[in-house]
Amino acid sequence: MAGNNATNQAMKVCLGTDCENEAGALECPTCLKNGIQGSYFCSQDCFKKNWGEHKALHKTAQTKLQNGQYNPFPKFMFTGDVRPVYPLSERRLVPKSIRHPDWAETGIPRGEERLSRTKVDILDAKGQEAMRKVCRLAREVLDICAAEIKPGVTTDYIDEVCHKACVERDSYPSPLNYSGFPKSLCTSPNEIVCHGIPDQRILLDGDIINLDISLYHGGYHADLNETYYVGDRAKANPDVVKLVETTRECLDLAIKMVKPGTPIRDFGVAIEQYAKSRGLRVHSNWGGHGINTEFHPPPWIPHYAKNKAVGVCKPGMAFTIEPILTLGKPREIYWPDKWTNATVDGKWTAQFEHTLLVTETGVENLTAGNANSPGGPIPIPNL
């Protein structure tokens, strides 16, 4: 799962097209009347300028019932085409014989709350070997889930597959009940930036979807994610292919930089420079993080330039790098479920993540795919 820069989380976003300003207290009066949340603008002039486009979105607030399924947030103004499809399935159980993280029952990651934000753990040989094992298991689970991606499959079904694969590997799915998250992985299609909740939505030919897998095994966590094409239509869209493949390449570029002595701030500089060269933007609210016996310990790994991250890579450090790129504005809005994070303009995003171990001479990609892993790069048209 992506780490969050909490200092930016509370910022309201202006819904004006191509507006980079922070929103004020001005809300669309029609949205207020209908109970639609989140329709903030930075000024009256910006609101008037965007009224023609904005008013068309009021129609998206209607509830559609079908076979007992429903949109739980009928008055929320969604920014793109993806909608939640409830009811959610019951919370899946993990046998008590499997070691649980400290939030499994309470939802509160107490261990993380007690951490110093400046102390970075250095793993000894035993810890490094434990990380290799849990990361190998996590890659297996991601590949199993990715093999099930096709038009007509629900994200809840993928969650079921993930949960079963974790349990079969004597592992706890780390997202389950982490700060109350209700499922065993995050499924984020199209304009969903991250932390999408698996539900009854059916994957469509032409979608892209990010699967974010995290495991807890032997007292250690692993974390990785990849973005996949659903069917063949998305592969025929040059903008979508550019988005997905450039994001993949940004992560690969950053991984090549990992070695003892590399400043942590340098990853973001390289990622943003490369993304901009392809006409894409980086979401700065989300970043990589340390990972070991805790899910999100220090260090914080920014993916954007001009960041103020401190510290350098040292042998024995384990952390993730997980850039998120977008075709539009790199700003987000939360759905009312308080987890699903969507782009403010409905434009699509892609993300890739690996768990990495700094070695004496460079880096070991602990969650690397293999020749049989689903997905993989395809050529970007017109480059």
Image: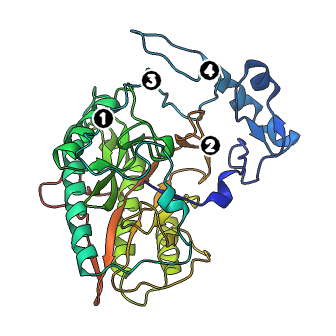
Count neighbours of disc 4 (C-alpha within 10 A) and say few if under 14, some if 14 to 19, many if 20 or more: some
Q: Residue 113: x and y, percent?
A: 55, 60
Circle on res. 333: 2
Q: Which amino acid does label 2 sit on?
A: Ile
**Residues at marks 4 and 2 touching, judged by CB atoms closer than 8 Å:** no
Q: Mark 1 or mark 3, which is nearer the start of the sequence?
A: 3
Image quadrant assignment for residue 235: top left
The picture places residue 225, in percent across and down from the top left corner, at: 34, 54
Disc 2 on helix, strand or loop? strand
Q: How far apart are marks 2 and 3 (CA)?
A: 19 Å
The correct choice, above or below, for 40 with respect to 12 in the image is above
Q: Which of marks 4 and 2 is nearer the N terminus?
A: 4
Q: Name the residue under label 1.
A: 93
Whole-percent x and y of residue 180? Answer: 49, 41
Check if mark 4's residue and mark 3's residue have beta carbons within 8 Å.
Answer: no
Of marks 3 and 1, the one in the foreground? 1
Depth-wise, is mark 1 or mark 4 nearer the camera?
1
Expressed as whole percent of the image width and height from the top left, the position of residue 189 reads 41, 40
Which amino acid type corresponds to the residue marked 1 in the rendered image? Leu
Circle 2 or circle 1, nearest the eye: 1
Q: Residues within 10 Å of mark 3 (few under 14, many from 20)?
A: many
Secondary element at tag 1: loop
Is 126 positioned to the left or the right of 275 in the image?
A: left
Residue that label 3 marks: 85
**Whole-number angstrom distance, CA of label 4 to CA of label 3:** 14 Å
Pick the front one: 374 or 378: 374
In 3D space, how far apart are the residues under numbered discs 2 and 1 (Cα atoms)? 31 Å
